[in-house]
Amino acid sequence: MFKHIIQGVTVVIALAAISGPAFGLSDAYKNNIYNPGELKPFDSVLKVKVGDPAPDFTLPAISGEKISLSQYKGKKNVVLSFVPAAWTPVCSDQWPGYNLAKSYFDENDAILLGITVDNLPTLYAWTNQMGKLWFPVLSDFWPHGAVADIYGVLRTSGVTERALFVVDKEGIIRYAHVADINKRPELGALVIEMKKLKGK
Amino acid sequence: MKKILISFTVALSFFILALPSCGQGSPPIEGGILPKISLPVPEDQGYKKYLGLKGDGTFLIPQIKAKVVLIEIFSMYCPHCQKDAPVVNDLFSKITGDDSLKNNIKLIGIGAGNSDFEVDFFRKTYGIKFPMFSDAEFSIHKILGEVRTPYFIAIKISPSGTHKVVYSKLGGVSNADEFLKTIKNLAGLK
């Protein structure tokens, strides 16, 4: 009996020591952020890889337009930023950073497309808290997560992974990164990948 | 039994060691003291001189040569911190432009969850002149109770080296003059 109690306590202590996702949260969202707690870091398998043509798609944007990946072919490099869900901790503090970092995208002749599986009204209300975003925000709501699924970043729960794809002007995937859903990918790493496109 | 006790001890040690990174902290309380926060001594000689530090390695915030240290917990990714940055710069200018304050109130920033690259980008974007430190793994942020950003803490340091938190609040600096007046009053500075 004593043995089982000690073993149980040991497991609980060890689990407690490694638990607890870390995130910062801007006061911009007040108390309106839903914290889902720590999630399984990865829950899908990529269906594309570096060197593949990026699957084309057309999605509605909160601006009212419809945006296709192919409209940038031959004109702009494209960074696709899939974030799991509106009004959640890590996601809410990811795009405001990219908003500030516009100069890095401009320097590398890149546009950013932000994508979630939330519907347009939700995305509209959420991104309004971030200030005026310079990049299109797209809804992959219906058919639910269809674009995320093509890329292999749709999780079984119906949200997406926290994923970044860099697509060059020829429409080829040059960088594919699925981050731990509980952590924000570091900006410097993305900037390095964008810089690699120069001269291509 | 011996093996069980060893594994128990190992797990307990792991837990205790991991406490600072497990969200065990709470926001500093006014009237209390700041938790131990170790920061790297800046390589930049200007920052080093500003903070009154010598040598290399790390330092604790109350070791900064000042009567009051104002700490901004910010994030490059935080819209309010972005909006607030010019006002915080104004606050810094008002402190450094006042002979009676420039050696007595020192300002530092800690970037919650921000890498060196991200802190440097934020600093360059807004032309921030006071020292800023990265907290890429949220370790300091956790010690400070995972406060939302921006969050300001002011500590008053006594000549003997002890200190007391005199200000600990969520929110930015909407008006540099009023904020400075508040900090001066709370710290008993003229």
Image (cartoon, rainbow, N blue to C red):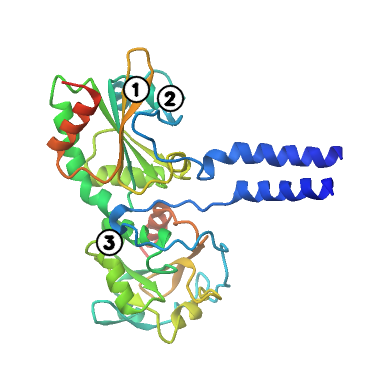
Residue A158, position as x, y percentages in the image: 50, 77
For marks 3 and 1, give the CA distance.
35 Å
How many numbered tags mark residues here? 3
Q: Amino acid at mark 3?
A: Met
Observer able to see residue A160: yes
**Residue at left offset 19%, top offset 33%:** B182
Query: Which mark identifies residue B59?
Result: 2
Looking at marks 2 and 1 on the same chain, the residue that comes earlier in the sequence is marked by: 2
Image quarter of residue A164:
bottom left
Name, please, the residue furthest toward the top.
B160
Q: Residues within 10 Å of mark 1 (few under 14, many from 20)?
A: many
Question: Mark 3 = which residue?
Answer: A130
Image quarter of residue A32:
bottom left
Give the SS element for disc 2: strand
Question: Mark 1 = which residue?
Answer: B64
* Position above or below: B48 against A86: above
For marks 2 and 3, give the CA distance.
35 Å
**Residue at left offset 26%, top offset 27%:** B106
Chain at tag 2: B
Chain at tag 1: B
Tell me if label 2 and label 1 are in contact, CB under 8 Å.
yes
